[in-house]
Image (cartoon, grey):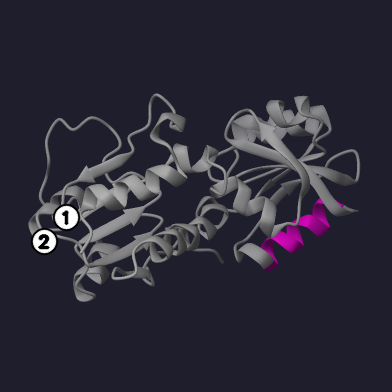
Amino acid sequence: MPKADEILAELSALAPPQLAEEWDNVGLLVQPPLPVDRVLVALDITQKVIQEAQEKCCQLIVSHHPVIFQPLGRLLAGEPAAELLRRGMGAICMHTNLDSAQGGVNDRLCEIFGLTQTQPMAGMGRVGLLQKPCSAGELAELCQKKLGGPVQYVPGQNPISRLAVLGGAGGDFVQAAYDAGADCLLTGEARHHEALLAKRLGIALLAAGHFETEWPVVQVLADRLRGRFADLWVGVSEADASPFCHT
């Protein structure tokens, strides 16, 4: 059975911790007390995901979003990190390092939308060419089909052929996408003033859901662990879901 440190080393080879932003918190955030033979992979470590991990006899949860993000002044009963400790589970979290990494969140989005000639955009993001130019409305429909969530969008002035992608909360990269020559920025969420900036610049902006734009990387993490550790059971969470409901 691999140790948590061995699993961390394998995931760090995919997403080196030095790629993480200075404000981020990544790595082995909760040490499991026992050797690991079963792992659950999720986007978020929530109460439902922890319960699922216990039901599946997992000693470790691997997630994208950190279970401990802000510095802890105190640890309260019922909080996810406290629940992990209480149940004897560990947590490894790969966040902005997985956004930036080759084969990570944003490269996976490039694959999903068939982008070619891709290049880095502002570190974490990517920009590349669509196989066929389309309108913002057409791309929004394609996002809904491929990612599964509702999409808000700001139409641009030009047909979209050069697309910038940045999963999660990437609305503040509108200017960077414009400077990179993109006709559109596809991200998870964007604020009102970021939509106004996109409209002023004439670049299209699509907000396709924070959860939905990052969820595809969960399978990447699971496949990586399955390929490296033959005796490790690796499951993808069925309880993990967007916190939002939609009418």
Residue 238 to residue 246: above or below: below
Q: How many marks?
A: 2
Residue sitting nearer the eye, 97 or 242: 97
| Residue 138 falls inside the magenta stretch | yes
Give the amino acid type for the residue marked by disc 2 in the picture.
Arg
Residue 135 to residue 185: above or below: below
Q: Is residue 188 visible?
A: no
Q: Residue at x 67, y 65 (%)?
A: 146
**Kind of element beneath mark 2:** helix
Q: Give the range drawn in magenta.
A: 135-145
Residue 32: image location, x then y, percent: 15, 53
| Residue 40 falls inside the magenta stretch | no
Marks 1 and 2 sit apart, C-alpha to C-alpha, by: 5 Å
- Residue under label 1: 84
Horizontal arrangement in the rendering, residue 212 relative to residue 127 (left or right): left
Q: Residue at x 28, y 64 (%)?
A: 39
Residue sitting nearer the eye, 160 or 21: 21
Residue 57: image location, x then y, percent: 19, 72
For the residue carrying disc 1, how many other residues have a C-alpha within 10 Å: few (<14), some (14-19), or many (20+)? many
Horizontal arrangement in the rendering, residue 237 relative to residue 52 (left or right): right
Residue 73 to residue 103: above or below: above
